[in-house]
Amino acid sequence: MQRLAKPPIHPSVCCLRYWTSNIFIHRYSVSKDTMSNEIDALAELKALVKLLQSNVDRIETATKAASLEFPSLRTTFSPQSEAARQLPDVAEASSEIVAAASQLIAAVRPPPLTVFSTGLSFHIPSSLRVAVEVHVAEFLRDAGSGGAHVKDIAKPTNVDPYKLARILRILATHYIFVEVAPDVFANNRISSCLDSGKSVATLVAHPEQRYDGTSGITALLGHFGDEAFKASAYLSDVMTDPATSHNYEANKTAHSKAFNTNLDMFSWFETPGNEYRGTRFGHGMNGSRASMPANAIVEGFDWKGLKEGAVVVDVGGGVGSQCLVLAENFSHLRFVVQDRAPVVLEGEKFWGINNPDYLSSGKVKLQPYNFMEQEQPVKNADVFIVRTILHDWANQFCIKILRNLRKAATPNTRLLVVDNIISYACKEEAAKDIPGAAMPLPPAPLLANWGPASSMSYLADIQMLSCHNGQERTATQLRDLLSETGWKLVEVRRATSFGLALHNAIAVPV
Ligand SMILES: C[S@@+](CC[C@H](N)C(=O)[O-])C[C@H]1O[C@@H](n2cnc3c(N)ncnc32)[C@H](O)[C@@H]1O
């Protein structure tokens, strides 16, 4: 029993021995307290497993009722074949499964392993970026389930096959690609998302056009794996440096430190040598649509209720991907897409590919506009959309953007803010006076904010912090920001989608 008195061996000395030693202590020192802890822990594990089972049953019932097949990981991704996931019951059951499975893993895995593997998990996005740059998914498109040998996959881009095999293996270990035989890899549903639809030969011959006409998914991953990843590596440095720790300027960020610039990220995109990054970012914003239900913007507002010829202004609208969806669904509306001048040029290409008639008929107008420096030029807007704009900026800058819009608003103008609306990771008093703002609570013992089922919102929050000193906001924070600038938040329409769910917040002038 003397061993029980020994302090546990510190994990930094040897985590495996630490665990062996602790298991020993646990087995042989069964006090009343540890006993009840063990029982609670087991009860929680069982509750989590029960949640997994009941939600799989729920998916089966919902998909059968709708005569839809739940997509298998072994099949190829396409937006159409994801239809089952859009069923509200399936979406909610999937969220519960992700939250329960993640909590189960956290509960059963030795904590040192959890912190070490979390601490090293940055190798996964860097490996993902290698796979995208080497066009692996496109190469494997025609290889089918038999896959291709890594020596062949490596050839078109002339990378080292032995290194590439290791990259693909860590991804396969995280369910992106499958290693079907030693050093032979095939696409699965997740890796096939990385397929831009172009041939490897075209991608290698014309790298400057690689994102043109694509879904934008690879462009978004390019932005994540380059600017955002490098910025994030400096987050701790800027947060602990007294010169930057309390600063909220958009040019005093982890990104500006990583790239040694005194410019905010959007201005930096326009500097010599970074233009391709700016273009990639524009395509990437289009790619963010892929993680949302196609009709999210359609259901986010009563577009049908607007009068014939009503003017919708998408402020910082990027290339105009949201207005394209709206234009295709609502023929009675007119659109103005505003953004920085270089983005507007990209927008012209985007509309040229997708629907040139909208531009030539005047239904859609692209307008260079800088919301930090210029007064809002459209004074008869029925709706101003700011989609994933406010989250790019700290409050002091959002106030400027929102006041500018308020000044240009008529009494009937509506403001549609589309952004992540986050919750605390514990229970909170919801903003009860805002219809739709309360986030539905998951069943016990899941985390009140749905844990990793909603992790995209919190990852986005840190992405905004690293790149812009921006932030995702709670409904209450958004309400307060709006009320400071002459807007009243009247309704939140929460997306029912799973994962990256941007929500629609509707405000009226006061
Ligand atoms: C996160 S993206 C969102 C794009 C689009 N609203 C969407 O949801 O896909 C932010 C956009 O704000 C634009 N932007 C940044 N600073 C701006 C400024 N000062 N004036 C106008 N647009 C700006 C960027 O060029 C970019 O297109």
Image (cartoon, rainbow, N blue to C red):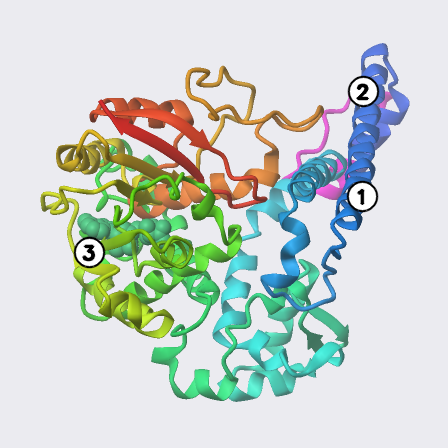
Which quarter of the rendered picture does the C terminus lie within? top left
Which quarter of the rendered picture does the N terminus lie within? top right
Residue 267: mark: 3
**Is 359 on the left-hand or right-hand side of 190?**
left
**Would residue 255 be seen by someone viewing this image from the given angle?**
no
How many numbered marks does the figure carry?
Answer: 3
Q: Which of marks 2 and 1 is nearer the N terminus?
A: 2
Q: Does the magenta stretch include residue 309?
A: no
Residue placed at 21% from the left, 46% from the top?
251
> How far separated are the C-alphas under marks 3 and 1?
51 Å
Residue placed at 71% from the left, 79% from the top?
144
343 or 113: nearer the eye? 343
> How far separated are the C-alphas under marks 2 and 1?
31 Å
Say if disc 1 is inside 8 Å of ligand 1: no
* Secondary element at tag 3: helix
Q: Mark 1 points at which residue?
A: 61
* Secondary element at tag 2: helix
Q: Which quadrant of the view contains residue 250?
A: top left
323 or 147: nearer the eye? 323
Disc 3 versus disc 1: nearer the observer: 1
Vertical comparison of 191 with 318: above or below: below
Residue placed at 62% from the left, 49% from the top?
86
109 or 333: nearer the eye? 333
The span shown in magenta is: 1-19
**Would residue 219 be seen by someone viewing this image from the given angle?**
yes
Mark 2 vs 3: CB contact within 8 A: no
Q: Which of marks 3 and 1 is nearer the N terminus?
A: 1
Q: Which quadrant of the view contains residue 108?
A: top right
Q: Mark 2 points at which residue?
A: 40
